[in-house]
Structure formats: C-alpha cells, structure tokens
Image (cartoon, rainbow, N blue to C red):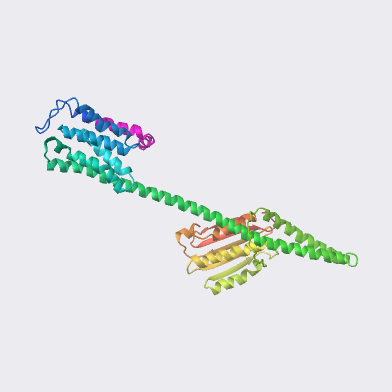
C-alpha cells in the first residue's frame, strides 16, 4: 500500500482519472430509463447523458485547473436541476471539485468566492424548474457541498502548516551550518593572530642572536656557537609554526595589538581564577615537565580554559579535575567534572561554539580530541597534542 500511494503521488493525473471514471459510471447508470423517478421530476432524455459527462469527466484535470473544473461541473449540475431532471450520483463530482478548490486555493476568502457562486447556482437551480424550493433537499445539498469545503480548508491549513515546519527546519539547519562555518572561520583567524605573534617573536629572537654571534664570532667562538645553536632551535620552532600557519585561510584586516599569550605554566593561575568564581577544581600534573612549542603551549592553555569555562557555565554545582600529562612526544589534557548538563549540552549540540573552537585548535596541531558525557556521570574533554609536530 505505501508503494501504491507513492506511485499515485508521482502520477496525479492517472489518480484523478481513476477517481473520475467511477463517478462517471455512477452518474450514467443513475440517469437511465430504469431509474426510479419522483413525480416531481421530468423523464430523462438524451440531454441527460452529456450533462452527466460534463459533471464528472473534468475531475481528471481537477489538480491542474481546480476552479475551471468546478465551474464546468457546477454549471452542468445546475442545468441538470433547472431542466427538472432527478438528482443523480454524478453530483458527487461537484462536491469533489468543491473539496479540491478549498484544499488548493490560497486563502479562505478566495476559496469561498471561487466556490460560492457555483454552489449557490446549483442549490437554486430546481427553483428555475417549478418555482419552488424544497427545504429538505436544499439542506441536504448544502451539507453535501459545505462539508467537503470545510474538510478541504482543514486539509489546506494542515498542509500549509506542515510546509512551514519543513521550511523552518530547513532554515534552522542552514543557519546552524552557517554559524558552525562562521565559528570555525573566526577561530582560524584568532589562531592565526596568535601564531603570528609566536612566529614574529621567534624571528626577532633569531635576529638578536645572529647579531650577537656575529659580534663575538672571532673574540669568543664558544659564545658564538651557543648563539648559533639558539638560532637553530628557534628557527626550527618558527618553521613548524609557519607550516601550520600556511594551512589557515586568514582574512583579518583588524589592527589588533598582539600581546604574549599564556601557556601551560599558567594553568595553575587559571584554576585559581576559576576557583574564585565558585568552581572547585583539582590539578594533577604527570610526567616530566618540559618546554613546549609556543603554539602547543598556547593551545593547551586555551583548551583547558575553554573546558573550565564550559563547566562553570553549564554544569551547575560541580567539582572539576584537570589532568596535564607530559609524554615523550605529546602532551595530554583532560578536564572532567561531575555536574549535570542539559541534554543539548551533553551531546555537544548546544548553542555555543566552545567545543568547535577546541576541536579546531587540536586539528590544526595534528592531534586528537574528544568530548562527551562519562559513563559514571558528568562530562569530559580530552585532547592529545603532539609536541614535535606529529604523534
């Protein structure tokens, strides 16, 4: 049945033809000479057959031209009544046409105007035959046309409401995607500014060391060798930062003042600030503390900062734990809490872009990132950052 319904939706004209044919047969069969006649009506003649066809056959085009179909069917039915023929089942086709207009015509007033004149003509047509109105038949005919009109309008409103919901959902999805793209773009620009500061600092140090090496090259070769070694180290770090910087699409025309950025060694001070804001936080540092590349040092600090900020904003009364683990080739960061978040925050689909920014930072450094609810409750953010540019 679902496949059949889908086939009919794809072939509406065939579906309407299959609707019009039974009504046409009913109209023709109920107009023959053997049909039971009321004494108030005249005997059928040859004219009754084309009128039955005009009442029913146009339904095959009801979705393509609903108002003309209603007009043709209603005029044929009105002529049928004005001549004095007995009502037939073919009149059901006019009721179907009324429903079609009501369910497709925009606006209730327009649909009412489109159907009103036709229906009034049909209801008044017997009066043209013998000058009398029959209240019972008038009421029955009014219901036969009024009920389809009301059902059609209800269907129209339901369909319009569903279409508005679909459009609203599509618009919300487009806006969400645009917001996510904008968040990534903004984060890339911010990271580009920070990396620019780091690389500029490294190059400045290299220039100063090169000048010092040139001055003491002959008088104190050992000092010169130390300066050259420092240049090599800073140069390698600067080259790594430049390679990462090339991957960014930066469009920044602001003349921001670039200042030195914090690193892992300032996480303890960050935790103190968060504690003063009301969140209980523990810090654990494992492994041998070592110097980090400037971009890794900065990103590690920012990840912990953003994770604690999210905990402070969304977890409610909670305790948090920060883990910093130094490995031989990477540094691992984990920020967990035991608070309760709204469901939209637990699956990472909240309104903010904190998780997007953290994931982007880790991706640019070639690391791995995960965030989500823990099995025992609470929420955890975990990041693994390579120290030497690869894992």
Is 51 located above or below residue 282 in the figure?
above
> Does any portion of residue 292 appear in the rendered image?
no
- Residue 122 percent across, percent down from the top left: 20, 38
> Does any portion of residue 182 appear in the rendered image?
yes
Q: Measuring 26% from the left and 38% from the top, which residue is drawn there?
A: 96
Indicate the quadrant containing the C terminus: top left, top right, bottom left or bottom right.
bottom right
Q: Nearer the viewer, residue 111 or 2?
A: 111
Is 260 located above or below residue 359 in the figure?
below
Residue 84, by quadrant, is top left
Q: Main secondary structure of the magenta part?
A: helix
Tell me: 198 left or right of 56.
Answer: right
Q: Measuring 21% from the left and 35% from the top, which residue is drawn there?
A: 77
Tell me: 346 left or right of 272.
Answer: left
Is 54 located above or below residue 299 in the figure?
above
Q: Nearer the viewer, residue 355 or 131?
A: 131
Q: Nearer the viewer, residue 155 or 63?
A: 63
Which residues lie in the magenta part?
1-25
- Residue 338 percent across, percent down from the top left: 50, 65
Tell me: 218 left or right of 85.
Answer: right
Q: Is residue 22 on the magenta stretch?
A: yes
Residue that lies at the very extreme toward the right in this rendered image: 218
- Residue 123 percent across, percent down from the top left: 18, 40
Q: Measuring 39% from the left and 47% from the top, which residue is drawn there?
A: 163
- Residue 297 percent across, percent down from the top left: 66, 63
Q: Nearer the viewer, residue 232 or 76?
A: 76
Q: Is residue 309 on the magenta stretch?
A: no
Residue 198, by quadrant, is bottom right
Residue that lies at the very extreme toward the left in this rendered image: 39
Residue that lies at the very extreme toward the bottom in this rendered image: 276
Indicate the quadrant containing the N terminus: top left, top right, bottom left or bottom right.
top left
Q: How many marks?
A: 0
């Amino acid at each position: 049945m679902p496949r059949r319904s889908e086939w009919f939706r794809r072939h509406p004209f065939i579906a309407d033809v299959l609707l019009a044919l039974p009504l046409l047969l009913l109209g023709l069969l109920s107009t023959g000479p053997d049909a039971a006649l009321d004494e108030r009506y005249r005997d059928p003649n040859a004219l009754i057959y084309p009128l039955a066809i005009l009442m029913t056959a146009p339904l095959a085009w009801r979705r393509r031209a609903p108002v003309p179909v209603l007009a043709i069917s209603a005029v044929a039915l009105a002529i049928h009544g004005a001549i004095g023929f007995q009502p037939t089942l073919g009149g059901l086709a006019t009721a179907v046409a009324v429903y079609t207009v009501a369910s497709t015509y925009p606006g209730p007033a327009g649909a009412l105007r489109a159907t009103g004149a036709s229906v009034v003509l049909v209801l008044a047509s017997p009066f043209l035959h013998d000058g009398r109105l029959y209240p019972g038949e008038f009421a029955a005919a009014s219901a036969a046309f009024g009920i389809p009109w009301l059902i059609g309008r209800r269907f129209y409103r339901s369909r319009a409401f569903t279409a508005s919901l679909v459009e609203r959902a599509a618009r919300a999805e487009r806006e969400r995607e645009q917001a996510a793209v904008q968040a990534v773009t903004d984060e890339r620009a911010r990271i580009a500014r920070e990396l620019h500061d780091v690389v500029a600092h490294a190059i400045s140090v290299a220039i100063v060391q090169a000048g010092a090496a040139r001055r003491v090259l002959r008088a104190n070769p050992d000092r010169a060798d130390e300066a050259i070694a420092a240049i090599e180290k800073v140069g390698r770090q600067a080259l790594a930062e430049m390679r990462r910087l090339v991957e960014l699409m930066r469009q920044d025309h602001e003349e921001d003042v670039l200042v030195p950025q914090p690193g892992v060694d300032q996480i303890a001070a960050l935790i103190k600030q968060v504690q003063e804001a009301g969140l209980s936080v523990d810090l654990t540092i494992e492994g041998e503390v070592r110097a980090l590349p400037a971009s890794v040092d900065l990103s590690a600090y920012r990840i912990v900062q953003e994770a604690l900020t999210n905990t402070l904003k969304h977890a409610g009364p909670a305790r948090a734990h920060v883990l910093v683990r130094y490995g031989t080739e990477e540094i691992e960061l984990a920020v967990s809490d035991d608070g309760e978040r709204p469901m939209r925050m637990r699956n990472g689909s909240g309104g903010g872009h904190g998780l997007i920014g953290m994931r982007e930072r880790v991706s640019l450094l070639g690391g791995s990132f995960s965030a989500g609810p823990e099995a025992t409750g609470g929420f955890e953010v975990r990041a693994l950052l390579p120290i030497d540019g690869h894992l």
